[in-house]
Amino acid sequence: MARAVSNRTKTLNTIVAGTLGFLLFFPILWIVVLSFKTEENAIRAPLEVLFSSGWTMDSFSAVQARSDYFKHFSNSVIIAVGSTVLGLIIAIPAAWSMAFVPSKHTKNVLMWMLSTKMLPPVGVLVPIYLLFRDFNLLDTRIGLTVVLMLINLPIIIWMLYTYFKEIPGEILEASRMDGATLREEIIYVLTPMAIPGMASTVLLNIILAWNEAFWTINLTAANAAPLTAFITSYSSPEGLFYAKLSAASVMAIAPILIMGWFSQKQLVRGLTFGAVK
Amino acid sequence: MGRIQLKQVQKKFGDTEVIPPLDLAIEDGEFVVFVGPSGCGKSTLLRLIAGLEDTTSGLIEIDGADATDTPPAKRGLAMVFQSYALYPHMSVRKNIAFPMRMAKMSKEEQNKRIEAAAKALNLTDYLDRKPGQLSGGQRQRVAIGRAIVREPAAFLFDEPLSNLDAALRVGMRMEISELHKKLDTTMVYVTHDQVEAMTMADKIVVLQAGVIEQVGSPLELYRNPRNLFVAGFIGSPKMNFIQGAEAVKHGAQTIGIRPEHIDVSTSDGAWQGTVGVAEHLGSDTFIHIHGIDGCDPMTVRAPGDVAAKHGDTVFLTPQTTQIHKFGADGLRMT
């Protein structure tokens, strides 16, 4: 039976939830508003900004004129997709072995992997920076792809592990009895059954890699800089480029926002780590 | 061909010995049932034969060749699992085709065998459905279909009927028996249900705690159980065991008498007791009787028209030729 809730409580809940939702969404909304204003209008008081006349696309063309958006965009795509694919190649066998041939140390290994996410990234900035310098990886896409893959690998493995755990072991044993080799077992039986879980994993990790700012900003200069570094280049201590900074931000988040919008269902599954079916 | 021989096969999980070294020979074309209470190691034994578990020591031979370290796919055996273990993302046709696809068999041959299996198992109309759209019995038949198209040396069944309801179970039991008659291939079947074991087996292997208690034909086990465990496990309702003065009279520690070998009378007999519960099945009446020395309650199988009810006094007489005698060590006395 559904819990009885009075209409008054329902209205109140709706108002509270709506307000909270609006507050959370407001910064993004404000960035979009600012991006369509001139620089001088953008630094006025909020209400004046909103009602000031003159909506313009000038900021966008100025941003595109100053820096090549599409170069940064393609860097972002390559790094985000590349690190996710590379991560999957390593994570699938890792998750497979932990889910189907667990040892008494499997839980510890999983916890250890998760624990690396608790370390502040800045703690390993110096060694990674030096490694990058010595191996000539600074400002390269391949270097960033590898680092972002490593950063997200624990999450990819954890997610795949939980999805694989849901697949009954007897089905894999049946495929072994049916003559499938390990490779065939993974390709024909395990992967098709884990496709929904893998899709959520891929989506979530593309988003995480797309938005990753610490390493992308610190390890790139111009060539490999993705959209996160592109936004940063418009932030200045004087705050005179609000409109352009907003335009750059809108251009950077738009693709991932659109992708996220169309894949909401898969994402929810991914974020709840397989708890919602 | 499908002769399976286990020689001193042992299985340990860590320090726990699940199966102490045992020997067993399964002849070509035989229907062998492993039966025993849950946790007796019967499924583990089957998985050792399948190759899904590694032996700790000992030798497994299939058709005379050492298969101890052969991977499951190369043993030429097919297995039907308790949970059916169908591939949920494949249609029935693809499920049945999967082992042939793995064996790189030609498409024409695959289709020929799929059609034949589907016909034999009444699955022709369901070939393009997914397993999720089938009933339990149909799923089990798909699992069997997937096993027969390979023409394996032997079939392994791991409690294949325990997920089905009672009526379906009886039907499938017969279908599997008929399949065995038709294919004449070795079948090894694991169950905890002694009725399944009795009705299907050529040879029953009774297991307890990983140890083979007795091997024999169903009637052999019924008539000459080697020890108390087998005597109590085979037969339904269970054999009555009587200890104390009555057993001593027969020169034994324990005597056993099956419910169907006791005559009931309302006027006179060897033992006297009162009816506790009478289960009227129509064809039979199972009467549970209290108040008999050394055995409480004693179960008696009487004809369906016996009008016993709670509290009635009855007299029982065992058929003397049907009394089983067991010594202090639990073994049958001859």
Image: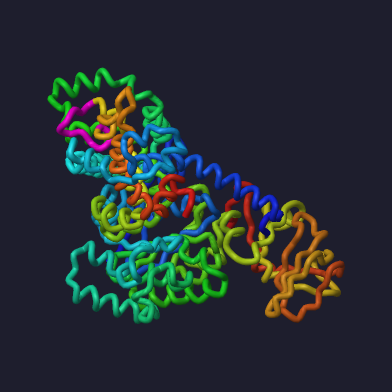
Judged from this view, the residue extending furthest toward the front is A53
Q: Which of A1 and B9 is in front in this view?
A: A1
Report the coloring of the rendering.
rainbow
A147 relative position to A27: left or right: left
Relative to B284, say whether A176 is above or below. Answer: above
Report the front residue among B219 and A46. A46
Most distant residue in the left direction: A136
Provide the residue span drawn in magenta.
A219-229
Q: Is residue A78 visible?
A: no
- For residue B79, above or below residue B129: above
Q: Residue at x 57, y 71 (%)?
A: B166
Q: Identify the main secondary structure in magenta.
A: loop
Between B334 and B151, the one lying in front of the other is B151
Marker count (numbered): 0
Q: Choose top left, top right, bottom left or bottom right for residue A20.
A: top right
Q: Is residue A81 visible?
A: yes
Percent coordinates x, y for residue A275 in the rendering: 48, 48
